[in-house]
Amino acid sequence: MNSVPERRDDTPALIAQSVSKTFGETVAVREASFEVERGEIVALLGPSGCGKSTTLRVLAGFERPDGGAVKINGEVVVDESTWRPPEHRRIGMVPQDFALFPHLSVGENVGFGLPDGQRAWWTRQLRRLRHVEAPARVREMLELVGLDGFAERFPHELSGGEAQRVALARALAPQPAAVLLDEPFSNLDQNLRASLRLAMRSILKAADTAAVFVTHDREEALSLADRVAVMRLGRIEQIGTPDEIYYRPQTRFIGTFVGDANILPGRRLRSGAETELGYVILANPPADDAGDSFDILLRPEQLALKPTTHDDPERATVMSSEYYGHDQVVRVRLRSGAEVETRLRTEVVWHPDDPVTVVVLDDAIALPR
């Protein structure tokens, strides 16, 4: 069997170079480029139909791109003249529905990903004997995902979270260069997702393999990934660390998609902008030729409230308050009629019709109007 060579220390585990894919007249992916280092977790985040799952399928070898290239450990596995089928790419895949074989035990499911020789030996032993100790690699993977002692159970005996871990163990068993995960939490109960995100990150980090996962859930992407690639209409609009994506969005779409956002008109003033909330400093001052009028973006937690009087001509008014114990979300109407949302601690509880002044706590982001 052909194999992908071992990665050199200075070579990314996975590289996508200007990958494009069309289906008829529909362009699913437009020149997507990114790299994933060994031990790094990258999220492809975007709304339905943005091309993220198609990108994953191109990386896995389930779709052949119309243009661009994919490299694994520095070697080209697909370009205009090269094609390596999925089984020769050293890529582990965790599908959305986990795709466990119902007639195989947990150990056999994990062992299914082993090299042919090891799997064939184990299968022969299982046919001869009722109980055979799983190969060391299977035991190692089950211990890694926290399922030590589960080897003889069957998929129907597992919870959704346990089934997900088995699917991940199966993908990791053959020591792939990279693991691809397609919406890994979509089939799990909402209450289970938060704890499993932490477990999934710990497992992938312990395995020290490159990982790419697809999601439309911004919380999943921001909490699990080392870097996030935000996709829209087949293009990667921005790739960066979670805090860069959240606090330094490069486009209006990213700013509003990855989190709640207040967008207000602004006018250039020195290195900042004059707004209805007063003068704000800009984290990304527009170029001199970009004009003097633009919009600014502030996250709810970048705003604070202080009490004022009904006689204050600069006052704003609380419209609503949602109290959550650890914080509260307060919506405020400004003098112009514009509305902003704030996320505050709960030492002071705000109520509708309270007169307030809105205070800007952090730098704003300038966006083209």
Image: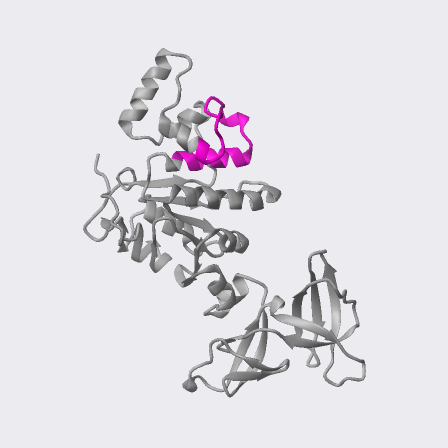
Q: In which quarter of the image is residue 27?
A: bottom left
Q: Evaluate whether residue 330 shows in this view.
A: yes
Furthest residue to the left? Answer: 81
Q: What stretch is highlighted in magenta?
A: 143-170
In which quadrant is the N terminus drawn?
top left
Viewer-closest of 337 and 176:
176
How many marks the image carries: the answer is 0
Side (left or right) of 245 relative to 329: left
> Which scheme is used to colour this image of the protein?
one colour
x, y percent for residue 69: 26, 54
x, y percent for residue 253: 50, 66
x, y percent for residue 238: 42, 64
Q: Is residue 222 above or below residue 119?
A: below
Q: Residue at x 36, y 24 (%)?
A: 135
Q: Residue at x 39, y 45 (%)?
A: 180
Side (left or right) of 114 relative to 361: left
Viewer-closest of 234 and 255:
255
Viewer-closest of 50 and 364:
364
Q: Quadrant of residue 347?
A: bottom right
